[in-house]
Image: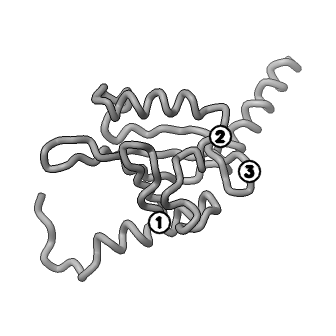
Amino acid sequence: MTMGTDLPLGFFEHLVVEGPDAVIYADAAGVIRYWNVAATRIFGFAESEAIGEPLDLIIPGRLRARHWEGYNKVMDGAPSHYGSGALLAVPARHKEGRQISVEFTMLPLHSDTGVLLGIAAFLRDATTRFEEFRTLRRELAALKQES
């Protein structure tokens, strides 16, 4: 990978820390080890509340079993069902207990020897757009029933 020589000092750190999308890193056990400013904005938890907590912090209760089944299989060496850069859309949990909708991509992180250390996720709040689509689907269904 070629990097420009004219990049300012701290360029990559600034992208991760201050970027518009949430960046969350969880280790192989699913414990949150990194939480950026956008993660706080999207999920409501301060960094100090999130670091050291399991991903259950942001996963709705009804989805946890399925999440952990897949997460643990991948950590044990099974290939992920989601390809590199695949955009996933799922419900998530806000600190206030309300459900939000997020879209995200994942990046597995490996040691120098190839051991899977954990997964970084890059998340964006899609709640408003999801609710707009749901309203449009309901309106379309109502129109179809009228005709």
Q: Residues within 10 Å of mark 2 (few under 14, many from 20)?
A: some
Above/below status of 147 relative to 137: above
Q: Residues within 10 Å of mark 1 (few under 14, many from 20)?
A: some
Give percent across and percent down for residue 139.
80, 32
Q: Which residue is mark 3?
A: 97
Q: Residues within 10 Å of mark 3 (few under 14, many from 20)?
A: few
Q: Which residue is mark 1?
A: 36
Residue located at (28% from left, 48% from top) = 109
Q: Amino acid at mark 3?
A: Gly
Question: Which of the pair 5/116 is nearer the observer?
Answer: 116
Question: Which of the pair 37/103 is nearer the observer?
Answer: 37
Quarter-of-image position of residue 3: bottom left
Figure quadrant of the C terminus: top right
Q: Which residue is mark 2?
A: 60
- Looking at the rendered structure, the secondary structure element under dot 3 is loop
Judged from this view, the residue extending furthest toward the right is 146
Question: Which of the pair 103/113 is nearer the observer?
Answer: 113
Quarter-of-image position of residue 84: top left
Residue located at (41% from left, 32% from top) = 72
